[in-house]
Structure formats: structure tokens, C-alpha cells
Image (tube, rainbow, N blue to C red):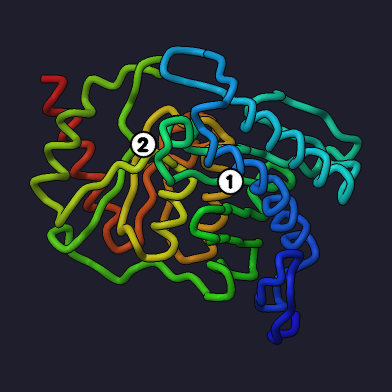
């Protein structure tokens, strides 16, 4: 593809190597984000219902998902969907499926914490092929497509080069009520805190994965995530040069929901650190 610049639906300049497919995904995210930004300013007036312990869904969440489905279906009418709120929708094209989280960081959103994102992944023949994660409050869009690299707006993404745990900033997502119990987690936190330069928990797995891709974090781990939490982030990570696995080193992240993502240099060190902490906590 050519390497010049073009303008998207928001008037944003981007590298024209962004494919028509990724452009469709980005423009869907922009449209859905309008309602989220508007409602975030009126968070106290939102209609909120419980869908599980410590797991909320708002009217904003549902409206954003409806917008994404409408826009993506219009552009690719044969593709299927895996939706956080709407479940599985089969398409006539069995090779392609959108995996969507319309509001990753719902708890942040509902408490007025300005850290949340829209996540759109495209799975092709069982593997993640393209991804878009959009943070509307910072106006940061992370994009990637297999073989075409990962980008933050118009900037090419690469993971960090840090090679020592003592220099590393590591992110995580803490287990919370309503998800599977992980009694070894406190020991993992203690081990990483003792070894790394710092540890962060911001409450949006999609953005955490993108931050590893952008070199802002050097590593991230979390348990029991859903496919829509990580689908887009997986391809963005891989196209940025990251290493991604299950916490035990497997390649079943989409099935298990357990994920470890690093800049590659620190992968085995962090994986070993987590494994040893888990082992110690069980003894």
C-alpha cells in the first residue's frame, strides 16, 4: 500500500497504508464514541442496571454496541458478530467475525473515571486479523492489521526495549467479585512489586494491551478476561512486536481469558516470576 497520508471521517490525518477494512472499523468506533462522550458528561443521569456482581451495563454501553453493529454490518453485511451484550450473531460468511466490546472500562465510566475505550477485533478463520481500540477522551486510536504493522493515530508502534525487571513498569487487572477466584494473585502482586520499577491497575484491559504495544508498559497480565476484552489488543500487540501468551506459556488466551503480554525481552522473566509466586502461595 502507498505510504502517503489521507484523512478519515473525523478529519484526522493518518498513513494511507490503513486499509479500507481498518478505515471501516475506525469510523464505526468514532461514531459510537459520540454517545459515550456525551453520556460520560452526564454520568449521574445514566440508566444503569446490574448484570452481575460488580459488573454493570449502562444505556450508553448498549447504544454504543447498536451503533457499532449497524455501521459494521452496513460495510460488511455477511460478517458475523461476537458481542459483549448481544451474544453471538452468525453471518453468511463463516470465515469472518467481528468481536466487539463497546465500552471496555465500564466501571470507570460509571464512576466518572476518564479511562475507557471501544474495542473492535476482526477474527478471520479462527485467528485475529485486525483490531481497533479507540480512547475517545484522549482521542487516541490504536489500529493494526496482519502484516501491516500497528499504529497509534499516524505513529508506528513498537514495544519498549527494556530488558531488566528492575526498570519495568508492569500493569495488571485485579480479580473482582463475580469473576473466578485466583487466590495466588496477592502473591503475584507482591512478587512483581518487589521486582519491578512500578505496577499499575487502570481498569481497561483493551487499553492496557495497547499500552504494552506502545511501550508505555513493559508487561501486563490478567486472569479470566472475555474474548471481547482482548481480541483487538492481541493483533495490535503482535504487530507492534510484543510477545503474548497465556500466563502458563500456552496459546489459549481467547479460550481461557488468562493473558501475559510483554515487550518480549521480559516475557520469560515475568512469566517465571508469576509462576513461582503462584507455586509459593499454594504451598
Sequence-first tag of 2 and 1 = 1
Q: Which residue is mark 1?
A: 37
Q: Residue at x 53, y 30 (%)?
A: 226
| 193, above or below 165, in the image | above
Give coordinates of residue 80: x percent, y percent: 80, 36
The residue wearing badge 2 is 222
Task: Kindly identify the residue that appears in the image at 37 percent across and 44 percent down.
Answer: 260
**Near-viewer residue (101 or 190):** 101
In terms of image quadrants, where is residue 84?
top right
Q: Residue at x 58, y 43 (%)?
A: 231
Q: Nearer the viewer, mark 2 or mark 1?
A: 1
Dividing the picture into quadrants, the one containing residue 5 is bottom right
Q: Helix or strand or loop: what does disc 2 sit on?
A: strand
Vertical order, 270 against 187 (above or below): below
- Image spot of residue 178 (x, y percent): 41, 15
Q: Would residue 226 be seen by someone viewing this image from the given angle?
A: yes
Among the 4 quarters of the image, the one containing residue 9: bottom right
Closer to us: 89 or 271: 89
Q: Nearer the viewer, residue 275 or 197?
A: 197
Assess disc 1: are there few (<14), some (14-19) or many (≥20) residues with their C-alpha within 10 Å of its C-alpha. Answer: some
Q: Is residue 104 above or below residue 133?
A: above
Identify the image quadrant of the C terminus. top left
Residues at discs 2 and 1 in contact (Cβ within 8 Å)? no
The residue that appears at 13% across and 40% down in the rendered structure is 191
Amino acid at each position: 500500500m502507498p505510504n502517503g497520508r489521507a484523512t478519515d471521517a473525523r478529519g484526522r490525518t493518518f498513513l494511507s497504508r490503513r486499509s479500507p477494512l481498518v478505515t471501516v472499523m475506525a469510523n464505526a468506533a468514532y461514531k459510537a464514541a459520540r454517545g459515550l462522550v456525551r453520556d460520560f458528561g452526564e454520568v449521574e443521569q445514566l440508566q444503569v442496571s446490574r448484570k452481575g456482581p460488580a459488573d454493570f451495563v449502562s444505556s450508553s454501553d448498549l447504544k454504543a454496541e447498536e451503533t457499532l453493529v449497524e455501521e459494521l454490518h452496513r460495510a460488511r453485511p455477511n460478517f458475523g458478530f461476537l458481542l459483549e451484550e448481544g451474544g453471538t450473531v452468525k453471518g453468511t460468511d463463516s470465515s469472518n467475525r467481528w468481536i466487539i466490546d463497546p465500552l471496555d472500562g465500564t466501571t470507570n465510566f460509571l464512576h466518572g473515571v476518564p479511562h475507557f475505550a471501544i474495542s473492535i477485533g476482526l477474527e478471520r478463520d479462527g485467528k485475529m486479523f485486525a483490531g481497533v481500540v479507540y480512547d475517545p477522551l484522549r482521542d487516541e486510536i490504536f489500529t493494526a492489521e496482519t502484516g501491516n504493522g500497528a499504529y497509534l493515530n499516524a505513529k508506528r508502534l513498537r514495544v519498549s526495549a527494556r530488558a531488566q525487571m528492575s526498570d519495568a513498569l508492569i500493569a495488571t487487572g485485579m480479580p473482582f467479585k463475580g469473576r473466578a477466584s485466583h487466590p495466588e494473585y496477592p502473591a503475584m502482586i507482591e512478587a512483581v512489586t518487589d521486582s519491578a520499577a512500578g505496577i499499575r491497575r487502570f481498569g481497561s484491559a483493551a487499553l492496557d494491551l495497547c499500552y504494552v504495544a506502545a511501550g508505555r508498559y513493559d508487561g501486563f497480565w490478567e486472569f479470566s478476561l472475555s474474548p471481547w476484552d482482548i481480541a483487538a489488543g492481541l493483533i495490535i500487540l503482535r504487530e507492534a512486536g510484543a510477545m503474548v501468551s497465556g500466563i502458563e506459556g500456552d496459546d489459549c488466551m481467547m479460550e481461557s481469558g488468562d493473558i501475559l503480554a510483554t515487550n518480549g525481552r521480559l516475557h520469560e522473566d515475568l512469566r517465571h516470576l508469576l509462576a513461582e509466586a503462584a507455586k509459593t502461595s499454594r504451598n
